Amino acid sequence: MDSSALLALGFVNAALLGGTGLVAVPVIIHWLSRRRFRRIEWGAMRFVLEAERENRRRTRFEHWLLLMLRCLAMLLIALMVARPFVRPGLVGELLGRPEPVQRVIVLDDSASLQYTTATTDFERLREAAENLLSWIANEAGGMPLSIRTTSRPAESCFSSDHFGVAAGSEARAALRALEPGVARAEPARLCAALAKLVAADDAARIDVFVLSDLQASDWLRGNNQDSVFAALYGLNARRLRLVLVTPPEESRDNVAISELAIDQPHVVAGIPVTARVRVTNFGHQRADGFSLQFDIDDLPLPARTLEPLEPGEMRTIVQDVTCATPGFATLTARLGQPDRFELDDKRCIAVHVREALRVLVVNGAPASDPRLDEVFLLRHALAPPGPLGSGVRVSELSPEQLDGADLRAYDVVLLCNVGPIASGARDALLRFVQTGGGLALTLGDNTLDAAAFNRVIHADGAELAPLPLSDAVDASAHPVGLVRTGEHALATALGDEAGRMSEYVRFRRYMRTGAASDAVPAPVVLARFDDDESTPALIERRVGDGRVLLFTSSINLAWNNWAAAVDGSYVVTLLELVQHLSRSEGHPASLVGGQPLNVVVSLDEYAPQAVFRSPHYPETPATSGVLEQAEVAGVERAVMRGPIADKLGTYTVELTPRSGAAEERPLCVNLDAAESDMRRATRAELDASLGEIRHTFATLGASTGQAEADSRRELWPILLLLLVVTLMAEQACAWWWGRVTPVRDTGRGRLLARTVGRLGVFKSHEER
């Protein structure tokens, strides 16, 4: 017989098996109730003794049977209280046909499990997993078992083909070595790994015990997305069973910094910028007594006291910050009063502080009158003279000088009323935009020849302009205004809430555009003229890593009065436009825990090597980056892939420029904002998401008992039935044998009264 079959019979309350000693109670009562008397011979007893000798054998059998029934009743009561059980398949095991069952224990090690009450939720789940291991080893061993985590569902941190008591200590040690991470659970990856496991073994039944907080943001998806359990749909329902084990249902209040960002795309040294922090109360109670602290490179700003937050309330706090020196800085926001989930009480972003935004203006029509000269107007709008700088540095070139110019020194190039240009200049502009630069095209008298403009700027294979030009519109009799279309990055500059840019600005002349080509991505219209045709006025399209923006009127006073408008919208719009189009360094402001640390650099400027240091450096050794890609949009670049961000905080990457000393950049790793919402998925929601997948729910306090109950068949109902039958038989026998019946002595004609089948145990005689 298999050893697992011997362990298949067990008792829920094994300690109460001592009650089987009650079997001796009827025997003791019999022993103590023996009648002791002196035998006295007298004449009338002769007939009674003869009758007793005739019935002695039958009477002894009756007494012994009653004693056995009463002892059996006591035994059944003791066994029923101890609750014996057998596992399903016991009969098959005894017959040499065991049912194969593969067990998989999945422990959720996502960030939300670090929520703390008396202990963390992760410690409670890990303790439940250890209890589950002990039960399986003692009661249902001998089958394959593996332990996995949600962060690495395809890998086993412990595996045994014949799990039993001997492997229990090793499995518990593997569990104790696990710690919660900083990433999300990603149950879809877990289900995909389980589907592969089912496909790899088409014979065994698979029981999967998932110990998780079942956070709704992880385990549920929106109506337009597939269920996270979709990979398990269609599998044999008899072969897979999920047991979902969760901590007891309780309110998990949490106040989090869910977002930290800077409004402006680029930060310039000495120029104030606006930082926005979003604080959210994810709990069910009012949150009071919180404060907010900002730091720039560990230099604190004055703390802000927050007004009470109602349940579910989200509030945005605005803070002006100024970075004094160029380079990379770290902006941090933290709550002054940590709660039970501290991972989201702090958030940081990396800020690339520029010395200035470098703008190149190509003037296609220099004019002696400053009011008609684009460069003169642009210089005063983007970099006005005076002690207060705007953070923009303007340079000027002629169209002839553009051919062969090194555009890598600039962030934005403005082509102002520039006619047809040389093919070399066009190729340089295309390469400039593809590598991340911004290009703005404004029109004028030199661009009225739409065919010549399109032939160079909108040629096949080099489509710089978002749309081709068509014909010019003369609206001098009825000047038109400008209306914003939708929401976009220039919304603050282009118009009020109604979308109108300005009541003072009127356009007397502009150009229509032709149909869009099959270029990908498609152009986006940001603003239109308010004429009858709603002619596009501001069109944008992505080209490689950069943007091209076409304005179908001029930016001098030749075609409109925009530069002379008293509302100052000309200056505001141009400054916003430069911020929007400027070349991005590509350095991430923030990363999410659990993601790889990637840095993209140009091989023209940096050597293909990087060193990553964790927030716990030097306790945690530095790691070298791996070069994965050497070309992006036709330009030599290096994608340096670092380690997985398994800690929250500020990492550091050291890069080696081809000229100059080593450069260090911060990599800020924050918690995924979705992890801050502690709401758990309800059983009804999970039932709907699981569909036809066979599943069972269990709470943490009863997880082991639930698993055991799901894998055993208790025998107490059978014992109860046997007890009732035994007691009824004992009572029936006692009544039948104990009744008084008349017995006639035929030899002597005398009526004797005797008792047949006494109710107590039979009595013996002792002479004194």
Image: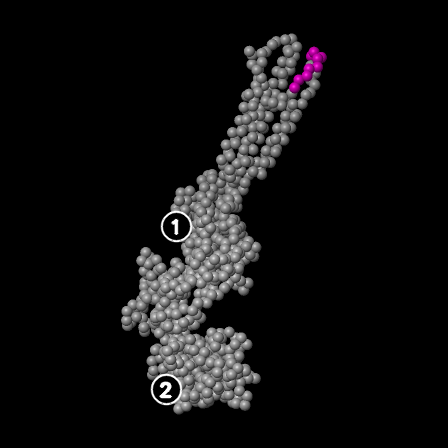
Residue 90, disc: none
Q: Which residue is mark 1?
A: 177
Say whether marks 2 and 1 touch (CB < 8 Å).
no
Left or right of residue 121, residue 356 in this image: left
- In the rendered image, the residue lying farthest to the right is 749
Quarter of the image where the C terminus is located: top right
Q: Which residue is mark 2?
A: 398
Q: Which corner quadrant of the image does residue 714 belong to?
A: top right
Q: Which corner quadrant of the image does residue 555 belong to?
A: bottom left
Label 2: how many Cα within 10 Å (few below 14, some 14–19, many 20+):
some
Above or below, 502 relative to 279: below
Q: Which corner quadrant of the image does residue 662 belong to?
A: bottom left
Q: Nearer the viewer, residue 62 or 665?
A: 665
Who comes first in sequence, dot 2 or dot 1? 1
Rendering coords of residue 447 (x, y %): 44, 88
Question: Residue at the location (43% across, 88% down)?
Answer: 371
Rendering coords of residue 655 (x, y %): 32, 67
Q: Which residues are magenta?
A: 746-755
- The amino acid type of the residue labelled 2 equals Ser
Question: Residue at the location (43% across, 82% down)?
Answer: 441
Q: Secondary structure at mark 1?
A: loop
Left or right of residue 610, residue 272 in this image: right
Above or below, 19 relative to 641: above
- The amino acid type of the residue labelled 1 equals Ala
Main SS, magenta residues: strand
As measured in the structure, the alpha-carbon distance from the residue carrying label 2 to the one carrying label 1 is: 67 Å
